[in-house]
Amino acid sequence: MLSLRAVNQFYGEKHTLWNVDLDLPTGQCICLLGAPGVGKTTLVNCITGHIPVQSGSMLWQAQGCPPEDLLTRPPEGRTALGIGYVPQDKRIFSQLSVEENLHIAMMAAGEQHKRISPLVYELFPELYTLRQVRGGDLAGDTQQQLALARALVNDPKLLILDEPTNGRGTSFIQDLGQTLRRLNQEFGLTILLVEQRLSFIRWVADKFCLLHRGRNVAQGDLTMLDDNMVSDWIAP
Ligand SMILES: Nc1ncnc2c1ncn2[C@@H]1O[C@H](COP(=O)(O)OP(=O)(O)OP(=O)(O)O)[C@@H](O)[C@H]1O
């Protein structure tokens, strides 16, 4: 679905991503992991188009369609193509209701006349009950559900989540794991998950990509991610 080759990114003079290669095959759940500050959020923002890359390629290929150069599209064009994003800071509109937040997300993808997919409220029934409540008045767990619902409302082909379990409790994490497994296995959604919690990663993901100081130092099936690798590259 998405292939990155030799991606380099700079913040001013600071070289942050170094020749990153990453493959996201259709229907798989890939976990992007690494210690804090290695460039995980930067990489997903390069994929969504919120941060420009200096060099490299990103080829997008939906089933039955010719490959497309993702780098030629602005962020909203990538959303329209099928990339849904749940950022670390959620970015929901606190003054707008749940329903308005979802409608704005659809408008951003050029789908202003569409109705909210019943699947979104099926996955998050609490959001249906609270659909007239302002985003800022929701509890933290429900805000995170709204951020996920907003990414799903445009029926993405690739869902990217940046540390969605961060700061959340056991019950939320359990529900999130079940939701992601369902989206991946029942609906065939491809998922790129930035995550630090190893038990969660082992539960939901098929493959991993390990970043260290902006370089992809290992990737493959999750069964290859052993304790030595974790202590060498991730543990402090
Ligand atoms: N806007 C920015 N301007 C300059 N440097 C930045 C900017 N954003 C991030 N950085 C730096 O780039 C590096 C990679 O940051 P990034 O947030 O991508 O790492 P990360 O692996 O996602 O970290 P975390 O797990 O803490 O979220 C860090 O050294 C960070 O300080």
Image (cartoon, rainbow, N blue to C red):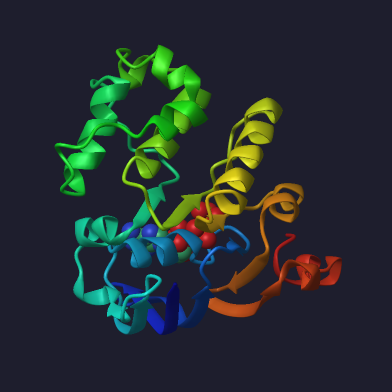
Q: Is residue 139 visible?
A: no
**Compared to 36, does 221 lie above or below?**
below
**Left or right placement of residue 74 versus residue 232 in this view:** left
| x 68%, y 51%: residue | 204
**Left or right placement of residue 63 versus residue 190 in this view:** left
Q: Position of residue 8 (x, y in %)?
A: 38, 81
| x 34%, y 84%: residue | 57
Between residues 212 and 68, which one lies in front from this camera angle? 68
| x 79%, y 73%: residue | 224
**Compared to 108, does 32 lie above or below?**
below
Quadrant (top left, top right, bottom left, bottom right) of the N terminus: bottom left
The residue most toward the right is 227
Q: Position of residue 69 (x, y in %)?
A: 27, 79
Between residues 7 and 173, which one lies in front from this camera angle? 173
Q: Position of residue 20 (x, y in %)?
A: 48, 81
The residue most toward the front is 64
**Left or right placement of residue 39 versus residue 58 in this view:** right
Ligand 1 shown in quarter: bottom left
Q: Position of residue 117 (x, y in %)?
A: 35, 34
Q: Is residue 144 visible?
A: yes
Q: Quadrant of residue 43?
A: bottom left
**Left or right placement of residue 14 versus residue 227 in this view:** left
**Compared to 99, does 150 lie above or below?**
below
Quadrant (top left, top right, bottom left, bottom right) of the C terminus: bottom right
| x 63%, y 61%: residue | 35
